[in-house]
Amino acid sequence: MDRQVKGILGAKLGMTQVWDNGRVVPVTVVQAGPCVVTQVRTADKDGYSAVQLAYGAIDPRKVNKPVTGHFAKADAAPRRHLVELRTTDASEYELGSEVTVEAFQAGQPVDVTGKTKGKGFAGVMKRHGFHGLKASHGVERKHRSPGSIGACATPSRVFKGVRMAGRMGAEKTTVQSLTVHAVDGDKNLLLIKGAVPGPRGGLVVVRSAAREGNS
């Protein structure tokens, strides 16, 4: 399958709104790149085609020798984050070259991957959207409890996957088919219509959309 993917790493700066022909458009501002190409994988050598991108400053003293040597091959300073993008045109990338926001253009659909905000331990109403028990007569102080989690005699156990209270958030999530509203090449900014996962300052990966949608 011939699938050419453009991608870049960045940090989520937050949300704002911009005017577009008299309409207010909510956008997420992403400080994207510049990223450096630290490895190019080919089908002949590695069995698949991909490009590895690095982003984010880090103190070289905190990087061990094997990783330092990996960046030295690309003639680049060590970076904090690495991501690999599978793309059939990986051979067109040069080791040590930079990838900037200029790889994207306004109106282009993209997928954004990030780590969601951690909410800590949460009950079933907040975590799964349960409606809880009745708020009227006959209910003890268990209004936010899940209720039954399974039958007694059969199967005499609780099935795996039953939705219960537990840790919520802090999971890798991808929001598909968002739209790039604007690209600022001078400030390395991407304005993406809508919300993307993660807190302010969180790492996000922006790549060309796997499928187009109506965003």
Image: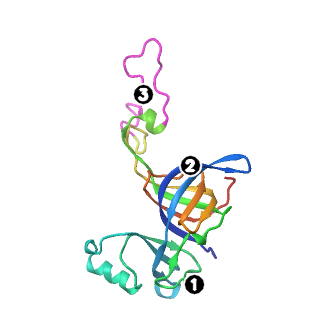
Q: Provide the secondary structure element on which disc 3 rests.
A: loop
Give the label on residue 92, or none. Answer: 1
Q: Main secondary structure of the magenta part?
A: loop
* 86 drawn magenta: no
Q: Is residue 154 magenta?
A: yes
Q: Is residue 151 visible?
A: yes
Report whether 9 appears left or right of 27: left
* Residue type, mark 1 in image: Glu
First in sequence: mark 2 vs mark 1: 2
Residue hosting label 2? 16
**Is label 2 in a helix, a strand or a loop?**
strand
Q: Nearer the viewer, residue 92 or 86?
A: 92
| Residue located beneath label 3 in the image | 147
What's drawn in magenta, residue-wise?
129-158
Q: Is residue 16 above or below residue 7?
A: above
10 Å crowding of disc 1: few (<14), some (14-19), many (20+): few
Determine the CA span between mark 3 and mark 1: 57 Å
Residue type at mark 2: give it. Thr
Residue 198 - label? none
Is residue 209 visible from the viewing direction of this image?
Answer: no
* Amino acid tagged 3: Gly
Q: Residue at x 47, y 14 (%)?
A: 136
Q: Quadrant of residue 115?
A: bottom left
Viewer-closest of 117 and 149: 117
Which residue is located at x 56 percent, y 75 percent?
87
